[in-house]
Image (cartoon, rainbow, N blue to C red):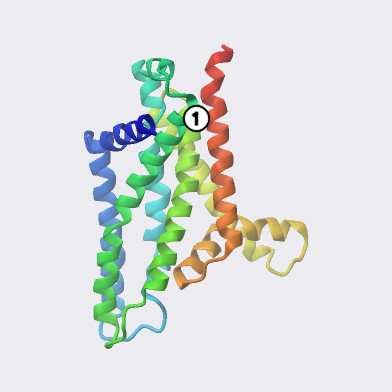
């Protein structure tokens, strides 16, 4: 366990020792600020009939953060070490392939979560200026953060797999971005299949990320969505582990 925590600390601290981490943090803060500035401008002086989290989710800035930040966060995980030649040194140490994969994934996910922490301040500010003495409801906030963590886990796992397949950070980021956008666009197929009852409609409803996050933002936690995100994350991490282990077959 000590070795695993050391690996996580090593990977997590590397984000704050490079320009990339600060660029990601600044970009996320900028997008969050733009989203809530537009909300304050639109709803200034009027009461909201929906949770503040739901209103923020309706802006495009939410998905811009998820789609753009995760490829940049994960592109260096394996690709940089392969390019610099430190990957083989790391993998020959008595830590185990599974620990390395899980440590890199955990560190990237933790950084993703940290980048979302300023959202709490923004929610409080918007609630103060758009409600009239109504107590702050923490349930939608908690469910929204749960959705962010689950969604982040899925996209970070996609980035881990993309980074393990190449030595180029640019290729890893591009591959992760393309896969993330493709998965996001699958959500809109639900609109075209909403009147159908076949297996295709059921499959699309299970992978409809937009609908899942809409429920989380409203304060509704659907266990089917939780199972989907956790299962997909485990499957992608398993694929990443097999890619890492494949070096032994060469």
- The front one of 5 and 115 is 5
Residue in the picture at 36% in, 29% down: 3
- Quarter assignment of residue 235: top right
Q: Quadrant of the N terminus?
A: top left
SS at mark 1? Answer: helix
Q: Residue furthest top?
A: 250
Q: Position of residue 49 (x, y in %)?
A: 40, 84
- Quarter assignment of residue 148: bottom left
Res. 138 visible in picture: yes
The residue under label 1 is: 98
Q: Position of residue 61 (x, y in %)?
A: 37, 59
Q: Position of residue 103 (x, y in %)?
A: 40, 35
Figure disc tally: 1
- The front one of 162 and 175 is 162
- Quarter assignment of residue 226: bottom right
Res. 173 visible in picture: no
Residue in the picture at 27% in, 87% down: 133
Q: Position of residue 164 (x, y in %)?
A: 47, 28
- The front one of 215 and 98 is 98
Q: Quadrant of the C terminus?
A: top right
Residue 71's place in the image compared with 99, above or below, is: below
- The front one of 41 and 200 is 200
Q: Is residue 228 left or right of residue 89?
A: right
Q: Residue furthest front?
A: 1
Residue in the picture at 40% in, 76% down: 51
Q: Residue furthest right?
A: 198
Q: Classify mark 1: residues with Cα within 10 Å, few (<14), some (14-19) or many (20+).
A: some
Residue in the picture at 63% in, 65% down: 191
Residue 97's place in the image compared with 24, above or below, is: above
């Amino acid at each position: 366990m000590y070795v695993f925590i050391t690996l996580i600390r090593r990977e997590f601290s590397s984000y704050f020792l490079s320009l990339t981490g600060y660029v990601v943090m600044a970009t996320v803060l900028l997008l969050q600020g733009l989203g809530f500035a537009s909300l304050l401008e639109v709803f200034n002086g009027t009461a909201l009939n929906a949770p503040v989290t739901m209103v923020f989710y309706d802006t495009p800035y939410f998905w811009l953060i998820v789609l753009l930040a995760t490829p940049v966060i994960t592109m260096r995980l394996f690709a940089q070490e392969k390019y610099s030649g430190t990957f083989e040194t790391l993998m020959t140490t008595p830590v185990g392939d599974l620990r390395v994969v899980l440590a890199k994934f955990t560190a990237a996910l933790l950084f993703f979560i940290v980048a979302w922490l300023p959202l709490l301040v923004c929610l409080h500010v918007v609630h103060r200026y758009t409600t009239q003495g109504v107590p702050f409801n923490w349930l939608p906030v908690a469910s929204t953060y749960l959705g962010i963590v689950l969604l982040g886990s899925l996209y970070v796992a996609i980035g881990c797999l993309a980074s393990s397949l190449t030595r180029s950070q640019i290729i890893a980021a591009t591959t992760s971005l393309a896969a993330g956008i493709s998965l996001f666009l699958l959500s809109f197929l639900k609109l075209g299949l909403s009147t159908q009852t076949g297996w295709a409609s059921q499959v699309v409803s299970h992978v409809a990320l937009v609908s899942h996050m809409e429920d989380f933002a409203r304060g509704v936690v659907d266990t089917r969505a939780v199972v989907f995100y956790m299962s997909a994350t485990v499957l992608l991490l398993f694929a990443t582990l097999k890619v890492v282990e494949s070096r032994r077959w060469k």
